[in-house]
Image: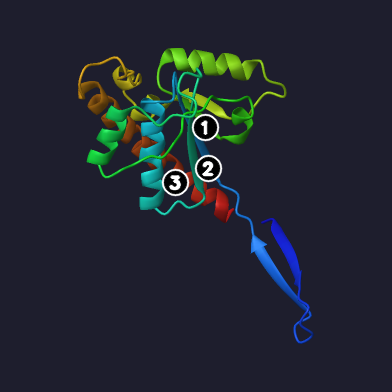
Amino acid sequence: MPKLCCEIHFRNESVRTCKLQFVLVSPTMKVLFVCIGNTCRSPMAEAVLNHLILKQQLEDWQTDSAGLRDWNVGTLPQGRGQQLLQQHGLKTAHLGRLITPQDFYEFDYVLGMDHSNLAELRQMAHRLQPPPQCKIMLLGSFLGRIEDEIIEDPYFTRGMSGFHAAYEQIRESCERFVQLHKGKERQTISN
C-alpha cells in the first residue's frame, strides 16, 4: 500500500522532529454511470450505489456519474429525480459533468443506461490509445432479464411514473452489481 510520509519541524527545542505517516488507500472498485445528459438516470444510479457502499461498508469503492452531452454541466440533477431520491431516504449533491477520455482509464466499470449510450461509450473508448481496460456495459444487464436491460430516460415523461420505473431498475441493478462484485473484491484483497 503506498505511504505518504511527512516531517514537521518545530522551533521548540524540546520537540525537534515529529513524523506523521498517512496511508493512502486507492479504491478497489470504481464505477462511473453515464446517461445522455447526467441529470436523471446516472445521478440516481450514483446516489443508489453510494447508499449501498455506505450500507455494506464498502469504503474502498468509489462512484461518480457523467453525461454524453454538456447540457447540464454544473447543474444539480433534475428536480423529479431528486424528489424521488428523497422519498427513498437518499440524496445527491452531484453537479452534472461531461464524460472525459480520462474516465475510461480511471474507472473499472463505465455503465450506460441504454443502447445509444452504450454504442457511444464504446466508440469513444475505441478511439483511445492505449486501449482502456474498463468494462463498458449496460447497468440494466446486471438484472439478467433482457426485457429490463434498457433503463428508459424519464426526462420527457409526465409526472413521476417514468422516474419510479427508472429508479426501481437502477436500484435492483445496483444491488445485483454489488452482490456480484463484493465477493470478488474481497477475494482480490486476500490473495
Residue 56: mark in rendering: none
User: Mark 2 or mark 3: which is in front?
Assistant: 2
Residue type beneath disc 2: Met
Answer with left or right where residue 16 lies relative to residue 174.
Answer: right
Q: CA distance from mark 1 to mark 3?
A: 14 Å
Earlier in the chain: of badge 2 and badge 1, it is 2
Where does residue 89 sit, x and y in percent of width and height? 26, 45
Tell me where residue 168 sits by quadrant: top left
Nearest to the eye among marks 1 and 3: give it. Answer: 1
Identity of the residue drawn at 57% across and 35% down: 107
Task: Determine the CA span between mark 2 and mark 1.
Answer: 8 Å
Relative depth, front residue between 1 and 3: 3
Based on the displayed image, in which of its 4 quarters is residue 40 positioned?
Answer: top left
On the rendered image, what quadrant is the N terminus found in?
bottom right
Q: Which residue is mark 1?
A: 109
The x and y percentages for residue 172 are 30, 34
Numbered disc total: 3
* Residue at image mark 2: 29
First in residue order: circle 1 vs circle 3 = 1
Nearest to the observer: residue 19 or residue 190 = 19
75 shown above or below 128: below
Relative side of 16 to 188, left or right: right
| Residue type pointed to by label 3 | Lys
State the residue in front, 177 or 103.
Answer: 103
Calculate the distance from the C-alpha at mark 2 to the C-alpha at mark 3: 9 Å
Left or right of 164 on screen, residue 173: right
Give the residue type that dot 1 points to.
Tyr
Residue drawn at (58%, 13%) of the image:
123
Q: Which residue is mark 3?
A: 182
